[in-house]
Image (cartoon, grey):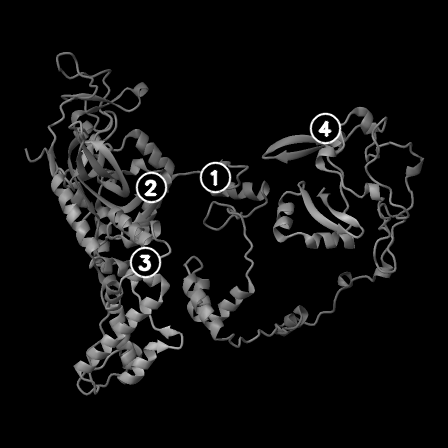
Amino acid sequence: MAANMYRVGDYVYFETSSTTPYQIRRIEELIKTPNGNVEAKVMCFYRRKDISSSLVLMADKHQSLAETLDEKSALDEEQEQEVELLSERDRHQLKHRELFLSRQVETLPATHIRGKCTVTLLNETESMASYLNKEDCFFYTLVFDPHQKTLLADKGEIRVGSRYQAEITPILKEGEEDGRRLEDLETIVYTPHHNLSDRQIDQFLIICRSIGTFARALDCSSSVKQPSLHMSAAAASRDITLFHAMDILHQHNYDIASAISSLVTSKGPILCRDEMEEWSASEANLFEEALEKYGKDFIDIRQDFLPWKSLKNIVDYYYMWKTTDRHVQQKRVKAVEAESKLKQVYIPNYNNKPTTLNGPNGENLVSGGRPCESCYTLSSHQWYAWGPPHLQCRLCQPCWSFWKRYGGLKYPSKLERLTAHMAAHRPHRCGFSSCGKEFKLKAHLVRHCASVHDSAIRVGSPRPIIKTRVAFYLCTTPLTRLARRVCAHLLQPHHAARNPFKAINVVAVKQECQTKLLEGLPKIPIAKSRNRGSILDISHRLGAPNIPIPEWLIAMPKNKLPQPERLAFPPPPRGKDGQLLIPWPHKEESRSVGINSVLPTILRKRGYEQQNGVDGPAAKHRAVVGSSPDLYKMADLPQGTIITRLNGRAKMTTIRFGGRKQTISLVDAPDDVYFIATPATRKLRRQLGLNEVRRAARRPSRKLYVKLPQYGIPSYRQVITQE
């Protein structure tokens, strides 16, 4: 009777399919539906086969990394020795006992419960073999997120061992003095040695509360949250006001007159508010919702609900929130709901059997003499079909029960052994995305990368030296460079350089930088350039002899360089001011041509006549007057002839795209464009905004609309087309 009674908090088996192993869940809540059925709200646990192979490798790597730490306790060494002493069968079964906790909650019918089990967090005080000796016993160490596909270490481990012990300083001997400076170890905030009585201190605290009440009346945000005088007085009587009053009194050497005068500055009375006043109503509702979901897991609360709050703020608010009537009221509501909810449910034993291979009279059936896939026995009271139907595999009764509960066989099957062998002897794969070839030996992969990809291989790694991620360019602002110097004690550049993946508290750096800038810019030493001399002088200082420079290293003067007989592409002439002598185009030709009005020969394949210059459209290149002599007698050609760099048939070229060869014609490619910037275009470019320039650089074929004011002519929108 007690074995079939299930309560909230029990770890149970759930069966979702007759051909799959049981799922392990923890009952969080029992719900009775209007139809009279009982449903269980459960938290999910995942087996090793339920997560991806990459995450399984990551979990094994995490385990091996934890075992190879330099600071290993005696308990860690004992666990490692026990694992080494286990046989191959025990190691195989130990993997079935490992689970992965998740925060995913789902609702399942209570009638699918098939029994109880035990799940515990693995810690250093337990033995690995203890889980193999217990039935229906599992352990977990990592937390799996099914949505983000990540693994995290559970934060609930028991800190046992020498790594977690406090380092106690030795006791001073008689007559020995303490060489430490106590001022560096602690800061005094209160001393009972003063000339004030308790009555005077109480009067001073009452004055501080009165000033706090008046400050809340002057503050607009506080008057909205606390509209009545009683609420303002209650907020002013909180611990934050008393702590501030005692600090002020200690700072002024317990002089009440000077302490009271410091409570009211030139800007008004000092207002001290704690987390209960700083948080808004919406933030309080988010905190209560997160507390209902995650409990006291403040790290997850901050990560998922309140990322703009620090962990200290959330913890302070939690303990202040527990003293409010809101918390007491919620406890009463939960107690009433708990009384109305189901405490336990009775589920009878499940007697329905899956598809079996027994004979009609219940005798043992040996189909073709095929043994059990796990224990290789030939006789059993019950046989069950297992695996793919075309393989016709089967399991005996004990192995079937073991497979349903633990999700694996007692002994590794041939398929599992083959998978483990392939994982241990993985081939070396080429890391280039366009290749992906596999090699049995690493030497073959090194030869392949050197000959085909012209790339080297890291020592001890089968991956080539290539960029696996997109490179980025960090452009720092002057304020960022100034913050590096001002907040060097917070940034710790040398420590950050040794640990580049460690997060930096940017909020603290910003606050410190703003405080220093308000006080005034500090004097920062300017880095002076060091003249280390030329490379030749350095080599002489390092011991290289003063060898004369050989003749083949001496640069020949430009006037002695051999000149060619003729220049195929001579540079255009320049004027006295250095600008190119190119005539300005006519007014009717000043507007550029849009992409939609380009000649059709660019957008489609040209015909034979157009390639050979017969009846083709006008040439697109304009002749530059006086720029170079007509070496090829271009003026003698008939008007409308297309000038091509080909004789007869169009030359074809072969380009490789993604490992495949693709043949294209050079005639189909658009002609090159030579753009000369003029003062007008430079002025026009300066009128464009930064966003428009970046947008034009990303999409060069897009039109830009700019207003150009002209003298004597009303302004109009001119279209600029980037070719």
Q: Label 2, label 4: how many angstroms apart (C-alpha)?
A: 54 Å
Labels 2 and 4 touching (C-beta < 8 A): no
Q: Name the quadrant of the N terminus.
A: top left
Pointer 3 residue: 279
Badge nearest the viewer, 4 or 3: 3
Most extreme residue toward the left, as rendered? 1
Q: Label 3, label 1: how many angstroms apart (C-alpha)?
A: 55 Å
Pointer 1 residue: 429
Mark before the other along the chain sequence, 4 or 1: 1
Q: Name the quadrant of the C terminus.
A: top right
Q: Label 4, label 1: how many angstroms apart (C-alpha)?
A: 42 Å
The label on residue 604 is 4
Question: What amino acid is found at the position of numbered circle 4 in the picture?
Answer: Arg
Q: Position of residue 704 (x, y in %)?
A: 68, 44
Q: Regarding mark 1 in the picture, which secondary structure is present there?
A: strand
Residue 125 shows in this picture = no
- Circle 2 packing at 10 Å, graded few (<14), some (14-19), many (20+), is some
Q: Label 2, label 1: how many angstroms apart (C-alpha)?
A: 20 Å
